């Protein structure tokens, strides 16, 4: 069975990039444009891992993560952001990883693999 | 800014003190006539120079809130001092607190806003006198991640409590919940180190531990989960045998865990030389008292046996003992004992009225109850058991709101 990932990012090009890249790595990939869509999708589907951008219009990724974890405390979540400032924020510490966004997806891809125990 | 933030957990149901906790949280239950249980922990804070306090409330918090507003409103925000009560925010979770650790986990945002260096976690329902600065100094000295305040309790009594097995430097090797054979403390084979529910944590460590714990299915309890887990991971957990500011022969720390122990700890106060000292001006216990006239006795008519008598008792403002006799009892404000009535070894909450010729013995009578003339409590156990709760120790508890009348003959 393919592992199922959900990527949330308000940047359309990044969503395309994540989808292409991670599908080529053999994952099933779903995307969301904002936190509201993430929460909607999480209601209906189960994901092995959710990758959240922090700065999104409306609810931010940290808040979305808190809501996800309050429903399923064992859900794996990666915060994937262009900013380092949130790293010290206690609210982000509940994430399984905090990754600084880059066009090079190596680090993200390795972290996904590590958290899912290889794929 | 003080690097220590204090969080007092005052959200438990207090079921073991039912019916006194039916309408009020356990920290708001009266103790010693004029005090509330929370006053002892808050006075410890005040006397230790602790001035930044969040109080996490939950069930039946109205009475507690009112008490804080009336009695503990003198901290100055402009100087960075505060006592703020925080009811559950449902910020992320749609439920009430699942355990002591969960109550703080759900309020991690408060820690994020303040970013204190350390967090002092206290429980709002214990009676003791402790200077928390001594604990903090010890914690800094050992460079521990968390230091747990410890009472020294005779080993045979400790098996109902959370016990720490520590090495000679007080580093904790094992944390045992209700052990059948409690390990002795270093250097004294007769007593065990019992957790007082007093913890000083390095903030970042606390946050990491709370998050780890939040992802488990355990009870989210400091004593049952967080501390044993930290010890299992070889984290630096230390015990601090507390220095008792009560300055009596034996160190004093009580968890009012049952109605019997509530009654007994209160009765201690009316003894000639109580274990718990309320009279130490160097460690004042602060509370709220309404503006009531002084306690009064009336009628000195010895010929007719109509004498207002108060013996070996604590009596609050506004009480009138009018031709009745009160012995070894504690009267909260505005209690009235009428002619020829007799009250012994009892605790009466505010506005209790004892009718003429009534007799009350070994009882706790909650707020506002009117005992009719000639009514007897504590003399006919079978009759009492039909209407009231009787504790295993034989104390009759009369709940507030009850309407009593003598059986029609």
Image (cartoon, coloured by chain):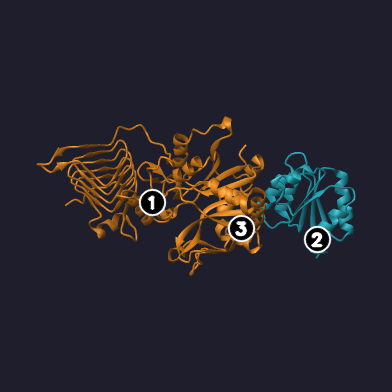
Gap between marks 3 and 1 measured at Cα: 38 Å
Mark carried by residue B237: 3
Compared to B118, does B168 lie above or below? Answer: below
Q: Which residue is mark 1?
A: B19
Query: Which badge, 3 or 1, is on the more N-terminal residue?
Result: 1
Cβ atoms at labels 1 and 2 below 8 Å apart: no
Mark carried by residue A114: 2
Q: What residue do we see at 50% from left, 66% from top? A: B184
Which chain hosts label 1?
B
Frontmost of labels 1 and 2 is: 2
Where, by quadrant of the figure, is residue B299 drawn?
A: top left
Which chain shows up in orange?
A: B
Compared to B177, does A54 lie above or below? Answer: above
Which chain shows up in cyan?
A: A
In the rendered image, residue A105, in percent from the top left (x then y), is placed at 88, 52
Compared to B188, does B297 lie above or below? Answer: above
- For the N terminus of chain B, the image quarter is top right
């Amino acid at each position: 069975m393919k592992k199922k990932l959900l990527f949330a990012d308000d940047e359309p090009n990044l969503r395309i990039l994540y989808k292409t890249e991670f599908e080529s790595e053999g994952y099933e990939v779903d995307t969301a444009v904002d936190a509201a869509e993430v929460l909607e999708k999480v209601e209906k589907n189960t994901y092995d891992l959710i990758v959240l951008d922090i700065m999104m219009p409306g609810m931010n990724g940290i808040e979305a993560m808190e809501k996800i974890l309050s429903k399923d405390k064992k859900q794996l979540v990666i915060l994937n952001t262009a900013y380092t400032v949130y790293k010290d924020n206690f609210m982000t510490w509940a994430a399984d990883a905090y990754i600084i966004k880059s066009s090079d997806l190596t680090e993200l891809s390795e972290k996904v693999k590590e958290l899912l125990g290889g794929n | 800014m003080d690097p220590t933030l204090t969080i007092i957990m005052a959200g438990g149901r207090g079921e073991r003190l039912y019916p006194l906790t039916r309408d009020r949280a356990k920290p708001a239950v009266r103790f010693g006539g004029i005090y509330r249980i929370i006053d002892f922990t808050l006075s410890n804070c005040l006397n230790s120079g602790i001035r930044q306090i969040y109080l996490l409330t939950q069930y039946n918090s109205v009475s507690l809130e009112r008490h804080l507003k009336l009695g503990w409103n003198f901290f100055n925000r402009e100087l960075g001092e505060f006592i703020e009560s925080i009811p559950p925010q449902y910020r992320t979770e749609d439920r009430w607190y699942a355990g002591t650790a969960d109550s703080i986990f759900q309020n991690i945002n408060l820690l994020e806003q303040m970013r204190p260096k350390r967090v002092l976690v206290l429980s709002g329902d214990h009676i003791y006198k402790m200077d928390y600065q001594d604990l903090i100094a010890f914690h800094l000295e050992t460079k521990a991640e968390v230091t747990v305040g410890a009472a020294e309790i005779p080993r045979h009594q400790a098996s109902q409590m959370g016990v720490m097995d520590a090495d000679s430097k007080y580093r904790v090797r094992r944390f045992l919940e209700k052990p059948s054979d409690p390990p002795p403390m270093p250097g004294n084979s007769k007593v065990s180190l019992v957790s007082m529910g007093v913890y000083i944590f390095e903030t970042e460590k606390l946050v990491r531990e709370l998050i780890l714990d939040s992802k488990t299915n355990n009870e989210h309890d400091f004593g049952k989960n967080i501390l044993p887990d930290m010890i299992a991971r070889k984290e630096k957990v230390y015990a601090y045998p507390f220095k008792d500011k009560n300055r009596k022969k034996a160190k004093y720390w009580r968890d009012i865990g049952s109605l019997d122990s509530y009654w007994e700890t209160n009765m201690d106060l009316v003894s000639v030389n109580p274990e718990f000292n309320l009279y130490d001006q160097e460690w004042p216990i602060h509370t709220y008292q309404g503006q009531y006239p002084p306690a009064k006795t009336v009628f000195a008519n010895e010929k007719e046996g109509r004498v207002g008598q108060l013996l070996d008792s604590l009596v609050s403002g506004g009480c009138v003992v009018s031709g009745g006799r009160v012995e070894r009892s504690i009267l909260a404000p505005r209690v009235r004992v009428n002619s020829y009535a007799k009250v012994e070894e009892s605790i009466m909450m505010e506005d209790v009225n004892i009718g003429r010729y009534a007799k009350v013995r070994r009882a706790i009578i909650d707020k506002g109850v009117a005992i009719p003339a000639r009514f007897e409590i504590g003399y006919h156990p079978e009759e009492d058991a039909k209407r009231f709760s009787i504790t295993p120790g034989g104390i009759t508890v009369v709940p507030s709101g009850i309407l009593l009348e003598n059986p029609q003959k």
